[in-house]
Amino acid sequence: MGRLFGTDGIRGVANVDLTPELAFKVGRAAAHVLAGDGNRFVIGRDTRLSGEMLEAALVAAICSTGGRVLRAGILPTPAVAFLGRAHGAVAIAISASHNPVEDNGIKFFAPDGFKLPEAVEDAIEASLERHDLRRAAGEEIGRTEELPDAVERYVDFVASLATVPPVGLRVVVDCAFGAACPVAPRLWERLGATVIPINAEPDGGRINVDCGSTHPEVIRAAVLAHGADVAFAHDGDADRVIAVDETGRIVDGDALMGLCALHLAAHSRLPGKVVVATVMSNLGLEIALRRSGLALERTRVGDRYVLERMRELDAPLGGEQSGHIIFLEHATTGDGLVTSVQVVNVMMETGRRLSELAAPIERFPQVLRNVRVNSRDGVEAHPAVQAAVGEAERRLQGRGRVLVRPSGTEPLVRVMVEAEDAGEAESVAASLAEVIGRTFGAPGS
């Protein structure tokens, strides 16, 4: 069995991989390992049908050890982290983010609002099968308490970040039938915008289905139909966001990071003059930042690694192309609503439309190829692959970028090529894929 915790908590098909029995074990183990943090836990979830089942298992587990549970109900994952920090408690978000309806997940945050270190996750995993964990009895059994003001407290916090009230701004918001439903429309109404909510019913059977941040064409159509100024599409737990400008153009996470970074730097609010992103962020973002004297620091894929590097560099801004963006001055994890408010702040402070603000962050054509292999080990260091990568970089002559990386979960090697010309990117990617396939390829690949 591989490591239970991935880069974004525990994930699996609910009631198949992620069963209530496993959730119970995880809850007891977590309560044991984290008891030194006050034995208080805030639990929130997205709208998935399996959420109540997994929440019940976790609540029972924690209470069986004598822990106290504060139930926040349906809320975005970053809101759960925010409330945990406010209460000095461990936060647990039950969600599978942008994944399909049938999936679910469990994500932990320490009382400081940050994800648990991998060593702590390992300690929880190592305690799953222990039979000597505490079982409370009598008056020591844990209790639960509802947090009826959870939504209002979070909305108040995000609303407080608006620097210029967007009164009259026409905003489309796609809640993806998920955790954004109780908060996103309310936030924009509170700020004085004209709100056009879509997919805003908390229907856990339709969460992420043909909507949200993985289907930005939905908000594109809504912007054009309603003559809106801007649109935001969240995923199931609202920790990420993709935007559409007033012309219907999609503005992804790279562009959102870029326009915010340029604005912050222009007002001397980007210490270190650095933005942290992953190796998958587009070359266009790097070039736009470089033109303004800013640097792009790249990490491996995963918001955990982005956040770690941000904290090491004391960088206030970082994120992923997917729209999972962290404004470290305001939040300890990616927050789609915080990001949306920051983007609108730039629009309102400058008096410029989103299309103008995003224009400097060009998107280079990007080609992705997955090559099935017998083994992922040693691919990057193999002389034939290194020679092919060197040849590809010479062909591009600084006009593009090459990335070869093994998948972390599948027998695949991922080849990514960016170039000014789409045809050249395709040609270079095909050549690299052919070399890797010939050298490491699985039969029939």
Image (cartoon, rainbow, N blue to C red):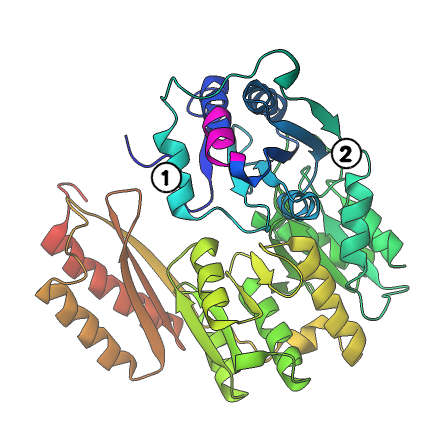
* Mark 2 element type: loop
* Near-viewer residue (321 or 45): 45
Instruction: Locate residue 176 relative to residue 50 in the image: left or right.
Output: right
Q: Position of residue 253 (x, y in %)?
A: 56, 62
What residue is drawn where x is 56% and y is 40%?
37
Q: Which residues are magenta?
A: 28-35
* Near-viewer residue (43 or 20): 43
Q: Name the dominant secondary structure of the magenta segment.
A: helix
Instruction: Locate residue 32 relative to residue 228 in the image: left or right.
Output: left
Q: Specify whether residue 205 is in view.
A: no
Residue placed under numbered mark 2 in the picture:
147
Which quadrant holds residue 241?
bottom right
Query: Residue lying farthest front?
Result: 139
* Mark 1 element type: helix
User: Where 421 falls versus 256 (above or below)?
Assistant: below
Residue 122, numbered label:
1
